[in-house]
Image (spheres, rainbow, N blue to C red):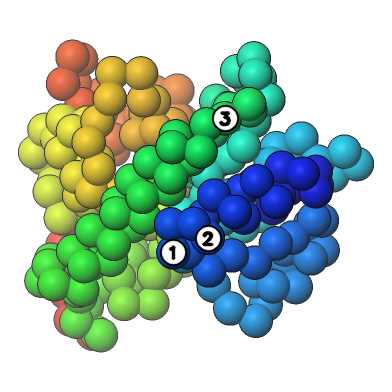
C-alpha cells in the first residue's frame, strides 16, 4: 500500500518484472476492502500515508493475520521502523530504495513465510490433536483453535504471531532456547545481531500471561543466551 502514485508504479513494475502479481491500494480503505476478498502472499506498507497512520494499519492487519508485511519508510524514520517491527512487521525498506534491494527483501520474507508454513504442517509438535489441551500455571491453551484462557477462565485475546511464540515455549518447557532457535521455530529465518524482533515478541507475550511483566516468572531471560519457559506443561485430552 502506497499513497504516492509514482512510488506505487515503481514498486509495481519492480515486482511484476520478477513475476509477481500485484494489486495496488492507495488508501487504508482500499487495502481493507481487498483483504476482505482474499489474503495476499505479502503486503508492502508505507508508514507515512498523509492523513492515515501506517503503523495503525500494520497493527490492525497483524491482529487478525500473519501475512508477511514489509514496511516502506522514509530515510531517518528510525522510531517508526522500530515500532513497526514491534507490531509484527517482517522487514522494512527505506526510501529512496534500489530495485534489487526490494526484490531481495521480498524474496527473503516470502521464503521465511513458506518455511514457517511447511514446518507448521509437517512438524508433529505443531499439529495438535483436535481435542488436545495444554495447561500451565492455571492457564489453558487449545492449540487447534488457537485459544488462550486465563486462570479465571476468561479468554485472552492473542495474535497469531504471539500464539506461535507461546506454543514454542510450551513445547520446550524448562529448556533454554537461544534467540536463534526461537527464530527458527517461529519464523524460520536467520538471526541478525541488530534484529530485536524476538525480544519484542517476548515482551508482548509477557504482557499477556505474566502477573508482572517487569518481573516475569513464566518466561525467564537467560542472560547472553535467550529465554526459558519455567513451568511444567500438562498435556491432556478432553
Q: Secondary structure at mark 2?
A: helix
Q: Secondary structure at mark 3?
A: loop
Q: Tell me the residue at 13%/72% (across/down).
A: 122
Q: Nearer the viewer, mark 3 or mark 2?
A: 2
Residue 150 lies, in percent from the top left, at: 44, 58
Q: Residue 19 got which mark? A: 1
Question: Residue visible at 36% across and 50% down?
Answer: 107
Query: Is the C-beta separation of discs 1 and 2 under 8 Å?
Result: yes
Could you tell me how far apart the alpha carbons at marks 3 and 2 are, in whole angstroms? 17 Å
Which mark sits nearer the N-terminus, 3 or 2? Answer: 2
Placement of 38 over or under 194, stated as above or below: below
> Residue at position x 24%, y 84% from top?
131
- Mark 1: secondary structure: loop
Residue at 73% from the left image edge and 67% from the top image edge = 32
Residue 67: x percent and y percent? 48, 60
Q: Which mark is residue 16?
A: 2
Give the crowd class for mark 2: few <14, some 14-19, many >=20 residues within 10 Å. few
Amino acid at each position: 500500500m502506497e499513497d504516492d502514485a509514482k512510488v506505487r508504479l515503481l514498486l509495481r513494475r519492480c515486482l511484476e518484472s520478477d513475476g509477481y502479481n500485484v494489486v495496488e491500494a492507495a488508501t487504508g480503505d482500499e487495502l481493507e476492502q481487498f483483504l476482505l476478498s482474499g489474503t495476499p502472499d505479502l503486503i508492502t506498507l508505507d508508514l507515512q500515508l498523509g492523513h492515515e497512520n501506517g503503523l495503525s494499519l500494520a497493527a490492525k492487519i497483524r491482529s487478525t493475520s500473519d501475512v508477511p508485511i514489509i514496511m516502506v519508510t522514509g530515510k531517518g524514520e528510525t522510531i517508526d521502523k522500530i515500532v513497526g517491527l514491534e507490531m509484527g512487521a517482517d522487514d522494512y525498506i527505506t526510501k529512496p530504495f534500489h530495485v534489487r534491494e526490494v526484490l531481495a527483501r521480498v524474496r527473503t520474507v516470502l521464503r521465511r513465510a513458506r518455511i514457517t508454513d511447511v514446518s507448521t504442517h509437517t512438524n508433529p509438535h505443531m499439529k495438535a490433536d483436535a481435542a488436545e489441551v495444554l495447561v500451565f500455571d492455571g492457564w489453558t491453551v487449545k492449540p487447534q483453535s488457537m485459544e488462550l484462557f486465563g486462570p479465571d477462565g476468561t479468554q485472552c485475546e492473542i495474535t497469531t504471531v504471539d500464539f506461535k511464540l507461546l506454543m514454542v515455549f510450551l513445547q520446550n518447557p524448562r529448556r533454554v532456547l537461544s534467540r536463534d532457535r526461537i527464530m527458527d521455530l517461529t519464523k524460520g529465518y536467520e538471526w541478525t545481531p541488530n534484529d530485536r524482533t524476538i525480544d519484542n515478541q517476548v515482551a508482548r507475550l509477557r504482557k499477556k500471561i505474566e502477573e508482572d511483566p517487569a518481573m516475569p516468572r513464566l518466561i525467564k531471560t537467560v542472560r547472553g543466551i535467550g529465554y526459558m519457559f519455567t513451568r511444567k506443561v500438562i498435556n491432556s485430552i478432553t
